[in-house]
Structures are given as structure tokens and as C-alpha cells.
Image: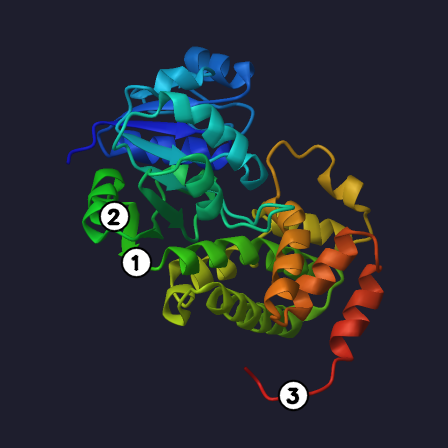
Amino acid sequence: MTFTHAGVVGAGAWGTALAQVAARAGLKVTLQAREPEVVASIADKRENTLFLPGVALEPAITAVTDMAALADCDLILAVPPAQHLRSAMAALKPHLKAGVPVVLCSKGVEQGTLKLMTDVAAETLPGVDIAVLSGPSFAGEVARGLPAAATLACDDEALGRKIGEAIAIPTFRPYWAADVIGAEAGGAVKNVLAIACGISEGKGLGRNAHAALITRGFAELTRLAVALGGKTETVAGLCGLGDLVLTCSSPQSRNMSVGLALGQGQTLEQALAGKVSVAEGVASAPAVRALARKLGVETPICEAVAAILAGEVDVDSAILGLLSRPLKAEG
């Protein structure tokens, strides 16, 4: 199996960056966008001025709004916001050729159903081979050609390795893994934890608190991943710990920037105002909290973030609640 034409569903910052990667790997790329202005911008200026301004796009990328334009693709990278994956895959289904694999690049837990993205894809695209791409990768850096690495998880090792080889370039290294659930869980939970780290930064709680949040947050992420059927060694890699460290350590992270604003006293509405890209953690937090409760997994940091976002508790009370928890053995 040789891949020659990649379709990218979703022309946000990350979708556009992955289109760049695929084009640099030698693939013809069709980038599907919901926004006509994005298509016009790419056609006229070779730039996604809405979601990824200042980055010159590769000539091999063609932007379209019509999902039917992906009918000739032999590889699909699905990059819509997590809460829109179901509708996006339903729209793709009539145009997806038999045997074409779909790589899920969205991170989150679906609200209401509490399903991971692979579950959503399995329901909307029955019989389709599914892989997951997740790792520490700011879109702007990847699009500009700065080095990055990610986990490419797929049940079928041969297929996973072929997909990895098709999109690999010297500055973007996909590492194959078999544990799809572990790869997904890391990506879903880290966005919620990044909001917590942003709040800590906004409140000026210092580097000690920041390190503690990442470490104890990683424990929560690991417990939830294992409860879902994932493996600890998977989340200790790029798709878990790596992604967590990146997302929790820079205001470049959309999720951390939301937390930063909350920690500085802004309301959620103010924190989200003017943002064109989606902060997945805001939508995922209540779903992660509900999923953890359903599985009986203790996730106090994720619980606190969900409570803050829902207006159930203010930031200071949530911090006091975390600091007042009974002492216990680490684990």
C-alpha cells in the first residue's frame, strides 16, 4: 500500500500544520475547511490567515469546502474540533473510498456520550481502519518546520508503520504504538490539566506548584487511561507525558492561555473572547469529569477545573480545596 493523496478534514491551525507535513512528505493534499474565507485565503495568498497567519503554505495543498473533494484521497487525517468529529465523519462517509484509513488527530472526550474519538469514529465509519496521531506539537512550530515527534497508534502494525512512513519528514517523526486507547486518553486529559496549570500561573503560585500540578495531573491522566484499557507505558511517552509537559508549559497552548486568564480574574466568557481556535479542554473538562466518575477514578485536579468552568466554585475556593485534601501515599 502506497499513499499518494492525503485529505485533511478541518483547516484549523493543527489541520493546516498537518497538511504542511503531508505536503512536505511528498503527498498531494486536499485540505477541507468549513470556512469559505479560509479556502479563499489559501487560494489567493497561500496562507491560512484566520487560523495560522504568517505561514507560507506548500504548493501541493489545495483547500476546498466540499467534503466530496476528498473522494479521491487514499489517506484521511481527521482534525475537526473533538465535539464536531461525529458530524464531520458522518459528512465524510459518503465520499470515503473502501480501504482508506482515517487518522484521528482531534483530542477530547465527546460530551453526552463520554466516548473517546475512536469510539465516535467506529460508530460513524464502521469497518474503516482507524489510527490516532497525538503528541507534543504546537501547530505553528510544526507548520514552520521546527522539529517535533508524535505517537501514531494503530492496532494494525503494518498499516500504522505505512501511515507513519507516508507522513514522516526529518522535522516530524511519528513513532508507532499499538495502544490506541492510551494514545487517546493522554491527549484528551492533558488539555484539562493545561487549564489548571494556566490558572496556577495566572494566580502567581510559582514554579513549585506548576511542577506539582503537572506531576499529580499525570497521575490522574494515567489512572484514567488504565481504567479505559490503556497502558501506563503508552502515556509515559509522547502522547501522554510529552504532550502534557508541552501543553502545560507555554501560553502558546490555547488551553493554558484560557487558564491563565481565569487565574488573573477574568470570567470564562472573557477568557474565550476573541479566540478563533478552539480550546478543547473547555469542552472536554465536564466530559472527563463525568467519565472519571463513571469509572470510579479519582481525578481531583480535573474535577476542580470542571467545577470552575461550570461556575460551581470560584478559583480561590478550588485551589483551597486541592490544598486541603488529606495527605496520602503518592501514586
Badge 1 local density, few (<14 within 10 Å), some, or many (20+)?
A: some
Q: What residue would you read off at disc 3?
A: 328
Callout 2, which amino acid?
Answer: Gly
Which image quarter: residue 276?
top right
Q: Earlier in the sequence, mark 1 or mark 2?
A: 2
Q: Secondary structure at mark 1?
A: loop
Looking at the image, which is closer to me, 115 or 185?
115
Is the residue under label 2 in contact with that under label 1 (CB below 8 Å)? yes
Badge 3 local density, few (<14 within 10 Å), some, or many (20+)?
A: few
* 172 shown above or below 65: below
Q: Residue at x 53, y 53 (%)?
A: 188
**Could you say where residue 161 lies in the image, as x and y percent from the top left?**
21, 48
Q: Is residue 11 visible?
A: no
Q: Secondary structure at mark 2?
A: helix
Q: What residue would you read off at disc 2?
A: 160
**Could you say where residue 84 lies in the image, as x and y percent from the top left?**
56, 34
Badge 2 local density, few (<14 within 10 Å), some, or many (20+)?
A: many
Callout 1, which amino acid?
Answer: Ala
Q: Earlier in the sequence, mark 2 or mark 3?
A: 2
Which image quarter: residue 63?
top left
**Could you say where residue 204 lies in the image, as x and y percent from the top left?**
73, 64
Q: Secondary structure at mark 3?
A: loop
